[in-house]
Image (tube, rainbow, N blue to C red):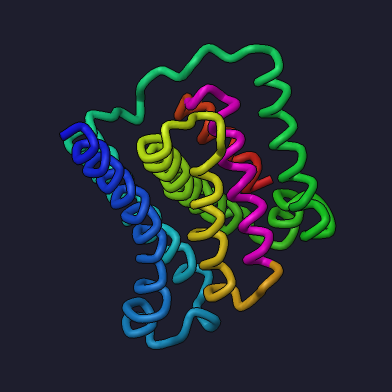
Amino acid sequence: MEKNTTKKLGWNYFWLAMTAFGGLGLEILWAFLIEPMIYGAPMQEWTTMQNILHWTITCVTWGLVALWVGHDAKKSCGFSLMEKGEQMKLWQWAAALGCVVVAVGINYLDWGGFKIIKEFQNKTLPVFVFQYIYYAFETVLFMLIVVFGQKLCETMFQKRNIPYGGIICGLTWGLAHIFTKGSLVTGLNGLVYGFLFGVAYLVVGRDIKKTWLSLFLMFAF
């Protein structure tokens, strides 16, 4: 009976992680199917306002998915995303900072400078603001992949010190970039980022607020 209960709980966490991943994929429907029909133009030819509208619609969609996943996690698994995380020790703060530094360093090499500065220089202020709001919501969804991927593997394998969630994030959100961005390098970078996200989640004591902030800094800066 206990084995069946564990298996069922594991599957629940699996579907929560995949729902978060699927939520990210909903942007593809908006960007390549629905909105081009509405605007009468493919994504590459959208105006500034159409791009801003796309980001707004996507953020609302992602926000609703995140709320639904959080509600379902509590209902089906008895797990609350807002549970207070573990108390952090000095080495954990240092490790979290290290994850951010490594990720920002990868961004720096990839962008030829700090990503946030490059984005600001190449965009008008309204576009820059909406772009980073979009990044903030995207961070929520891939964070949920990390969290529930971690819970899935911990439930099934009974080990807590391996960044399973980051591995799953890298294999889903990361590799998906190969297809959406058409770049193998971007996809491989996603694998590395995903692993770092998983490590960050563990070292910040599984605190959801600290996790989101860490992942946002790693992704957007």
Instruction: Classify 4 as above or below 125.
Output: above
Viewed as shown, does residue 74 lie left or right of 82? Answer: left
Q: Main secondary structure of the magenta part?
A: helix
Q: Is residue 157 above or below residue 18?
A: above
The percent coordinates of residue 185 (x first, y second) are: 71, 69
Image coordinates for residue 24, horizontal then vertical, percent: 41, 59
- Image quadrant holding the N terminus, namely top left
In the image, taking residue 48 as reference, residue 68 lies left or right, namely left
Taking the spot 78% from the left edge, 60% from the top edge, the residue there is 110
The residue located at (24%, 45%) in the rendering is 68
What residue sits 53% from the left and 12% below the top? 87
Image quadrant in which the C terminus is located: top right
Q: Position of residue 138 (x, y in %)?
A: 47, 51
Looking at the image, which is closer to me, 8 or 75? 8
Instruction: Answer above or below: position of 49 versus 158.
Output: below
Horizontal side of 102 relative to 4 (left or right) equals right
Is residue 198 within the magenta segment?
yes
Residue 5 locus on image (x, y percent): 20, 36
Q: Nearer the viewer, residue 120 or 155?
A: 155
Which of the pair 89/137 is nearer the observer?
Answer: 89
Picture quarter containing residue 148?
Answer: top left
Q: Is residue 188 above or below residue 63?
A: below
Total number of numbered discs in the rendering: 0
Q: Please tell me whether residue 132 belongs to the stretch shown in magenta.
A: no
* Rendered residue at 77%/51% (across/down): 106
**Front in this rendered view, residue 103 or 61:** 103
Report the span colored magenta: 186-206
